[in-house]
Image (spheres, grey):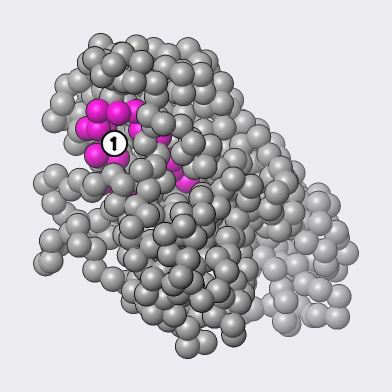
Amino acid sequence: MPVEILMPALSPTMEEGTLSKWLKKEGDKVTSGDVIAEIETDKATMEVEAVDEGVIGKLLIDAGTEGVKVNTPIAVLIQEGESAADISSSAKKEEPKAEAANSDSDAAGGKTREASEEPSAAKEAAKVPAAPKIEVAADPDIPEGTEMVMTTVREALRDAMAEEMRADEKVFVMGEEVAEYQGAYKITQGLLQEFGERRVIDTPITEHGFAGIGVGAAMTGLRPIVEFMTFNFAMQAIDQIVNSAAKTLYMSGGQMGAPMVFRGPSGAAARVGAQHSQCYAAWYSHIPGLKVVMPYTAADAKGLLKAAIRDPNPVIFLENEILYGQSFEVPKLDDFVLPIGKARIHRKGKDATIVSFGIGMTYAIKAVAELEKLGIDVELIDLRTIRPMDLPTVIESVKKTGRLVTVEEGFPQSSVGDFIANQVMRAAFDYLDAPILTIAGKDVPMPYAANLEKLALPNVDEVVQAVKTVCYK
């Protein structure tokens, strides 16, 4: 089966680059990791590797072509025995389109903290659905008849911060590149221009330092939003988060708290390596005094971030780089706020329950669509909040379906799914018709190579097979 090789990104905000030269030609055999081309921008050069073993069936972009959009197919890999005729007619050789567009493909390739592309004034390209269309249950938190607007997760997060900053002058945002550069992922775009440098603050690359400044500001009554370029870097600040922010209310006997938000991307992006790919949902959910939120949709991102900013407790707000460019319906309301600690039944069903959160929902939703074709009616729950967790919603669903599968990208040991399984066994053991199964990332550091990264992450087939197993199909 032909496999497309895509134009990667050199940095989180790279939108296009030059395919400077091909190092392989059509008909050449390659193995995974072989360098096949070089791409460049005005700031950096990068090698493009084959994502699998096979034969270069077709080169789709000529060497020297400028303005190649990130995620554009640049070559097609076929297996021995296949011919170029097997390549889908959709993979036709074409020049990159001239119109400006935001590729929303932050996660297409490796990045460094130094690499920066200039902010683009280009508008976003046509929206791409995050998952197959399935029948979705109505959200009880959104009034019936509300007008809905298609919005990216990136825009929803920015709008949430802007609305709260307009409503409360004590709210401010700080972090690396949040001001002049408009955010490493453009989440803070436009905030500096509207609120000024006193409320949108660029910090040095010293997470322990600026997280501590944020905690101190919160202790004085301000409401800081501390952005980490990635939560992997927040490990430098974990002492401030756990020993200062989370414990202040308890250790002061309720006299002083730390009303603040720590936010940024968590989990795997695409080929950013083991040190930049960890999911921190389970890590922070262990800590009394913290609330942990991990939204999937743009509506949840907006409504829950507004709630997090208003919360009197420190909130860990985990986002996902791959979801930033995905578009979802967001209610057009003056003040849309969702309750922290309340799960959402994404789809009602009767045969089995799937529980997921964050980007894990992409696997779950696609699996539900496949299972529907097999006649298995799945109830899908989006946790949205990891701590405090809405266990009653999960338990009531399991009492109805008798079967449970959890889905997440984090490491399997001491995972969120393990905790859910433990609690359901305690509260609903007599209702279970099959053992609970948990789907998680593999118990290895995240590989850099694309083919190995794919193996390390959960996949739709694993979820489908798990549900079939608990349904004895």
Measured along the vertical axis of the image, is residue 266 above or below residue 350?
A: above
The image quadrant where one finds the C terminus is bottom right
Residue 359: percent from left, percent from top: 48, 54
- Residue at the (73%, 82%) spot, across then down: 85
Between residue 291 and residue 197, name the one nearer to us.
Answer: 291
Q: Tell me if residue 1 can be seen.
A: yes
In the rendered picture of this protein, how many numbered marks are placed on residues? 1
Count residues near mark 1 (Cα–Cα under 10 Å), then give few for <14, some for 14-19, many for 20+.
many
**Circle 1 sits on which residue?**
308
The image quadrant where one finds the N terminus is bottom right
Magenta span includes 153:
no
Residue 154: percent from left, percent from top: 37, 45
Magenta span includes 303:
yes
Between residue 89 and residue 256, name the one nearer to us.
Answer: 256
Look at the numbered disc 1 and give the secondary structure of its residue.
helix
Residue 247: percent from left, percent from top: 39, 21
What's drawn in magenta, residue-wise? 300-320
Q: Is residue 64 left or right of residue 227?
A: right
- Residue at the (46%, 32%) spot, across then down: 287
* Image-quadrant location for residue 162: top left
* Image-quadrant location for residue 140: bottom left
- Residue at the (43%, 64%) spot, across then down: 428
Measured along the vertical axis of the image, is residue 151 above or below residue 164?
A: below
Measured along the vertical axis of the image, is residue 51 above or below residue 415?
A: below
Q: Tell me if residue 356 can be seen.
A: no
Residue 176: percent from left, percent from top: 46, 23
Between residue 94 and residue 470, name the one nearer to us.
Answer: 470
Q: Is residue 159 left or right of residue 143?
A: right
Q: Name the amino acid, label 1.
A: Ala
Which residue sits furthest front?
430
- Residue at the (58%, 65%) spot, across then down: 437
* Image-quadrant location for residue 119: top left
